[in-house]
Image (cartoon, rainbow, N blue to C red):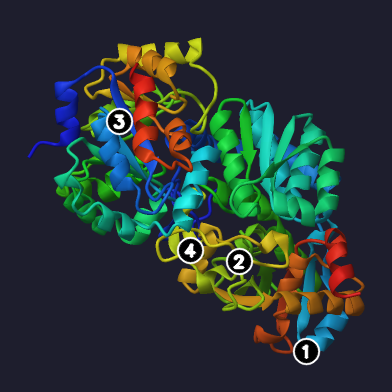
């Protein structure tokens, strides 16, 4: 069976809209309906955040959503239970994203097995370095048919980007700036130069830009240089304390796609 | 300080101590960490570096610190106790050994801005101090809760010209200050060096900090030999939060297995009270602050908030070197409660006329249970002085 992420990029290589949402936020059992509304409104792919108490690469908004989710009782065990039948309703690619420790405690192989059983397509673990992935976990990822997605930042060397391209088999996550998630600034000229540099490398894998993508303007700019973009913090803000997820998600996505 | 040390208790070339250590960093920090990994040994064992480092340790920090035979304390515990007086270092604790080393390193890396995390404020003060000395701007992250309970150290840092930024996320203590410092480093990767204060964090920090602190055991070895003719002590006792003073005190004795190494953790209200920081008893292996090590966590891997009356020991984990010393049983891990530490403060004050820091008092508190005999030589690393804890002592003791 082909991977949903690869199918997506084969069918559509421009303006891919991906959202990030912390599982268990705003309420413990919201993830399934968030996925349904996202798919219905034309979101192409979703990164489901696995909450962690100490999300070092994230800004205050995503840390807040992690804290709420943990307080709501969200754990990996609960998440896999919630996602057990998700493929009966959702056909867009789903990626799990989170820090290494909860995965390590769950058992990396158990985690990959259960993620695969739920129909998850890929995993992003920002603090699992390439060396540890290659030496300890790559074969396990392949066994359970899960794509490991690497991050590239403005500081990543050309040589390393090439190595990441070789190790990747889904897409590469381009971190837009030297910053944690949830930056407020618009996209600067220096960032566009960095995007152009990546674009000019003509990597084998599709590229998707994330961090600081928050509205139609930043989404459109990112899509000029990449196959798509990921919106996290702005989406978390849009559904924070939502009384009507269906409407709030629909109106947020319409504004991006307008 | 010697470069090559072949020891199963030292870090290997991949950054691991046994199964502990590594560099579990997000990609954003990769260039910084890679640069450090490639250059740190070359830089710190460069002749000019060593000359400048040793000179500052002597003239600025006040090294060597005395190794003091504590006769009344020895009489009380029926053994031979020597105190390694790190409390007499400039700024009041061993922390400055490391900040001197790291700021010299930062300058050689061409960095123009320094950040640090701090719990009790001792590392923050030591960092602010060397930044003033080297004329570099300094930002210290400190948990909002710690800012309140260690107010005099906040003022000290400000007087030294540092900016103290409150960490307002999570438990608002040391681990959160560490998170905020990491975030700052992610945002400022090219001009900034992050001076980590303990033997924690991604490789090469644990090894680098241990090497800078190893001056403690280097001096102990020499001073003990001068005083007693003995090559080694029978026991070395030190408190452990992240573990930098213990790493320095143990360093040159790691391979002499006849030397019993005793690490003392903070038991807070009691190891199983739910308010404790006794990591080796309550923790499991996992990845925290970019290192695979032992720390206190829930079943599903969320970090548990620790408790200790001593802000410097109020950390949920220990460094990977100590995790390996625990795992291999090379070091013996004991713990002392808040109350035991407070009693030890009074004991040392009254018997020896020395008011210790709350952290160091934890090491004193276990002297009756390390199993030392009459003629055994026990070296206790008195890592800091008690000035910063006076408010607590006034509230709890006097």
How many residues crowd around disc 2 within 10 Å: few (fewer than 14), some, or many (20 or more)? many
Badge 3: chain ID: A
Can marks 3 and 2 be said to lie on one chain?
no
Q: Residue B299: horizontal and vertical position, in percent?
A: 41, 66
Write down the residue under mark 3.
A164
- Using the image, tell me which numbered label, if any, was put on residue B211: none
Residue where numbered disc 4 is placed: B297
**Which numbered disc, 4 or 2, marks the residue closer to the eye?**
4
Q: CA distance from mark 2 to mark 1?
A: 23 Å
Q: Are marks 3 and 2 in contact (CB under 8 Å)?
A: no
Quarter of the image for residue A2 reads top left
Subunit ID for the residue under disc 1: B
Query: As rendered, which of B361 and A232 lies closer to the eye?
Result: A232
Q: Is residue A83 placed above or below B129 in the rendered structure?
A: below
Q: Position of residue B172 (x, y in %)?
A: 65, 52
- CA gap, disc 3 and disc 4: 32 Å
């Amino acid at each position: 069976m082909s991977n949903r992420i690869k199918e997506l990029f084969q069918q559509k290589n421009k303006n891919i809209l991906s959202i990030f949402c912390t599982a268990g936020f705003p309420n413990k059992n919201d993830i399934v309906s968030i996925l349904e509304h996202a798919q219905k409104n034309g979101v192409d792919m979703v990164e489901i955040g696995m909450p962690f108490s100490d999300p070092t690469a994230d800004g205050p908004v995503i840390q807040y959503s992690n804290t709420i989710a943990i307080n709501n009782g969200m754990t990996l065990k609960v998440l896999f239970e919630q996602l057990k039948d998700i493929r009966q309703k959702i056909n867009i690619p789903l990626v799990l994203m989170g820090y290494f420790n909860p995965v390590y405690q769950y058992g990396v192989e158990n985690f990959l097995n259960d993620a695969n059983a739920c129909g998850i397509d890929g995993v992003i673990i920002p603090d699992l370095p390439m060396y540890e992935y290659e030496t300890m976990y790559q074969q396990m990822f392949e066994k359970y048919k899960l794509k490991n997605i690497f991050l590239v930042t403005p500081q990543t060397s050309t040589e390393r980007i090439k190595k990441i391209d070789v190790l990747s088999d889904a897409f590469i996550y381009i971190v837009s700036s030297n910053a944690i998630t949830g930056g407020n600034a618009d996209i600067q000229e220096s960032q566009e130069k960095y995007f152009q540099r990546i674009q000019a490398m003509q990597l084998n894998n599709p590229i998707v830009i994330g961090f600081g993508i928050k509205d139609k303007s930043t989404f459109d700019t990112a899509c000029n240089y990449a196959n798509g973009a990921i919106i996290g913090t702005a989406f978390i803000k849009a559904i924070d304390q939502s009384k009507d997820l269906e409407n709030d998600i629909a109106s947020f996505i319409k504004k991006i796609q307008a | 300080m010697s470069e090559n040390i072949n020891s199963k208790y030292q870090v290997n070339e991949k950054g691991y101590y046994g199964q502990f250590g590594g560099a579990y960093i997000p990609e954003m920090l990769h260039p910084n960490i890679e640069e450090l990994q490639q250059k740190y040994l070359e830089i710190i064992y460069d002749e000019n570096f060593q000359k400048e480092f040793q000179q500052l340790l002597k003239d600025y920090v006040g090294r060597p610190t005395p190794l003091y035979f504590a006769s009344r304390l020895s009489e009380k515990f029926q053994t031979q106790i020597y105190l390694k007086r790190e409390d007499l270092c400039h700024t009041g604790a061993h922390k400055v050994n490391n900040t001197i080393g790291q700021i010299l390193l930062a300058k050689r890396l061409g960095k123009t801005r320094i950040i640090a995390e701090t719990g009790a404020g001792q590392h923050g003060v030591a960092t602010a101090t060397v930044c003033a000395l080297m004329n570099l701007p300094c930002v210290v992250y400190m948990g909002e809760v710690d800012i309140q309970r260690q107010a005099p150290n906040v003022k000290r840092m400000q007087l030294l010209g540092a900016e103290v930024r409150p960490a307002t996320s999570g438990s608002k203590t040391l681990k959160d200050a560490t998170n905020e410092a990491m975030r700052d480093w992610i945002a400022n990767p090219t001009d900034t060096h992050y001076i980590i204060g303990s033997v924690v964090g991604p490789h090469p920090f644990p090894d680098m900090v241990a090497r800078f602190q190893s001056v403690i055991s280097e001096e102990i070895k020499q001073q003990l030999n001068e005083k007693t003719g003995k090559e080694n002590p029978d026991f070395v006792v030190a408190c452990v939060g992240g573990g930098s003073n213990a790493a320095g005190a143990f360093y040159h004795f790691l391979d002499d297995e006849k030397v019993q190494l005793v690490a003392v953790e903070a038991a807070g209200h009691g190891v199983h009270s739910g308010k404790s920081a006794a990591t080796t008893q309550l923790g499991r292996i996992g990845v925290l602050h970019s290192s695979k090590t032992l720390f206190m966590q829930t079943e599903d891997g969320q970090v548990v908030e620790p408790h200790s009356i001593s802000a410097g020991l109020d950390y949920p984990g220990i460094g990977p070197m100590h995790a390996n010393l625990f795992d291999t049983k090379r070091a013996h891990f004991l713990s002392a409660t808040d109350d035991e530490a407070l009693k030890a403060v009074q004991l040392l004050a009254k018997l020896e006329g020395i008011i210790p820091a709350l952290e160091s008092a934890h090491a004193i508190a276990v002297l009756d249970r390390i199993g030392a005999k009459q003629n055994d030589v026990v070296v206790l690393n008195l890592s800091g002085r008690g000035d910063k804890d006076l408010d607590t002592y006034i509230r709890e003791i006097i």
